Image: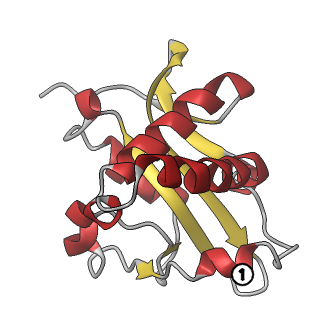
Amino acid sequence: MKKLPYVFRLNTPDDRNYILRSWLKTWRDEPINSKLPTSVYYAEANPLFGNILERFGAIVVCNPNDFNQIYGFAVCAFIPVAEEWILFWLQVKAQYSRLGIGKALFNYLNFGFKGPICPFVRDKLRNLIGELNIIDNPYILNMISEMSDLKSAEYKLI
């Protein structure tokens, strides 16, 4: 299989709707949210995810010849005091899955030996928690508003 060329970049305002819609829809489809009425889910998740994206940004994987052709993205933040990463969400478009893009993005973020703290872990990825050293902690969301020293995704590209 031919390797797909890609580059990493920060999200732009033009990416916001795509990233937010993708994140909202994919998390909505998780079994944990299946009994939640759609109106309640979107009323709660849309402002939460939107605020996280606005505050921390995302790393986008895209076509090196067309930055508007997005293959995937990761929304993350760094906690300097604890030297920990929070990986809010990592997603690759379905047509680009199984091409190593998700793994390349995860590796690019270089979370170190501890692995990232993840408040949202999809069911199909639960079997990778140990392998990737992911810390599954939904309660980190309760603490984020009090953490003023968090660094945005841009910190990764500096």
Q: Position of residue 150 (x, y in %)?
A: 79, 69
The quadrant where residue 11 appears: top right
Residue 123 position (above or below residue 13): below
* Residue sitting nearer the eye, 44 or 64: 44
* Residue sitting nearer the eye, 93 or 32: 32
Which amino acid is tagged 1? Met
Q: Disc count in the image?
A: 1
Q: Position of residue 129 (x, y in %)?
A: 30, 76
**Is the residue marked by circle 1 packed among few (<14), some (14-19), or many (20+) residues within 10 Å?**
few
Q: Secondary structure at mark 1?
A: helix
Residue 110 position (above or below residue 42): below
Q: Residue at x 32, y 67 (%)?
A: 32
Q: Position of residue 31 (x, y in %)?
A: 25, 62
Q: Residue at x 24, y 38 (%)?
A: 97
* Residue sitting nearer the eye, 22 or 148: 22
Q: Position of residue 130 (x, y in %)?
A: 28, 82
* 126 relative position to 109: left or right: left
Residue 15 position (above or below residue 157): above
Q: Residue at x 71, y 87 (%)?
A: 82
* 72 relative position to 99: left or right: right
Q: Residue furthest top?
A: 65
Task: Quickly name the residue at label 1.
Answer: 143
How is the structure coloured here?
secondary structure
Residue 104 visible? The answer is no
Residue 49 visible? The answer is yes
